Amino acid sequence: MGYGRGRQLRGRLFPRLLGRMILLMLMFCCGFVLYYIASDQALPFEGRAEVPYSKDRGEDGGRSNSDREKESEEEKGAWQLILVNKWNPMPEDYQVELTKLSNGQSVDSRIYPSLQKMFDDARSQGVYPTVASGYRTARKQKALLDEKIAEHEAEGCTEAEARRKAKKWVAVPGTSEHQLGLGVDINADGVHSKGEEVYDWLDRNGYRYGFIRRYPQEKTEITGIINEPWHYRYVGVEVAKEIYRQGVCLEEYLGEVRQ
Ligand SMILES: [Zn+2]
């Protein structure tokens, strides 16, 4: 009987215990869910105070992503890859914002930081370059050409021949990268370094700063300009590295080789 009663008791106790346990578990679960919801709701509250910031940040994030894409597209297509040579004159309305260097020369403001960094690094390695010629106006370019023509005429050339020869050295106004402010003639300072040292350093390192040797010896047919180890052109680091790696000139890189 006792046995029977105990069994009966246990029979009543177990479902009750089970029920309590389930209830406890439910309460625990509800508590957890409520806590979770409450803490989840706390985020917008926290966020609300920061809305201008987080919203701006969000929008900025979105903007800067697309901006970055646009910028890199622009980098690939626009100002730093503009091709100017004797077959591709620069646009007549080309505008350039200049930064003046300490020696009086100027360059496109956008290339100035890279140029400065390149010079700083060269100097820290014991090589002392200087910008012999940066930005030129059309007038300056014409004066240089006229000067060169006069030199050849003085050597006894006819005017036509003098002009033809001069054009190999000096670009006709409108066809010089110097008028873009993106081309720079870099020479040795003449005190601490010799020309060859500077040209050699630039040849090995210029691309790291976004500058390419624009008129190499082996590309004169394509560029239309004689070997100029001093003339460097800014194209941006990415493109400069690629041009250096492929051993091509700008015309080849852009697929603009005149047939
Ligand atoms: Zn030059």
Image (spheres, rainbow, N blue to C red):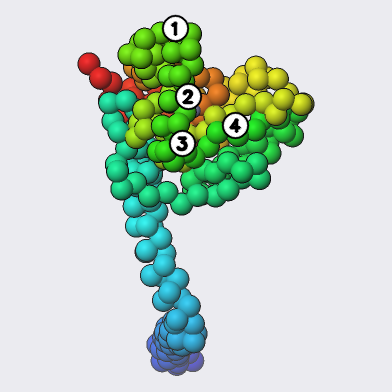
- Amino acid, disc 1: Gly
Amino acid residing under circle 3:
Lys
Give the residue displayed 42% in from the left and 64% down from the top.
61
- The quadrant of the picture occupied by the N terminus is bottom left
Along the line of sight, the residue nearer the viewer: 126 or 225: 225
Q: Name the mark nearer the viewer: 3 or 4.
A: 3
Which residue position holds label 3? 140
Q: Name which of mark 1 and mark 2 comes first in the sequence.
A: 2
Q: Earlier in the sequence, mark 3 or mark 1?
A: 3
Tell me residue 42's x, y (percent): 47, 86
Residue at the image point whose x is 45% and y is 86% from the top: 48
Q: Which mark is residue 147?
A: 2
- Dot 4: few (<14), some (14–19), or many (≥20) neighbours within 10 Å? some
Dot 1 corresponds to which residue? 156
Q: Which residue is mark 4?
A: 132
Residue 16: % across, % down: 42, 91
Q: Please, is residue 149 above or below residue 210 in the view?
A: above
In primary-sequence order, the first of circles 2 and 3 is: 3
**Amino acid type at mark 4:** Ala
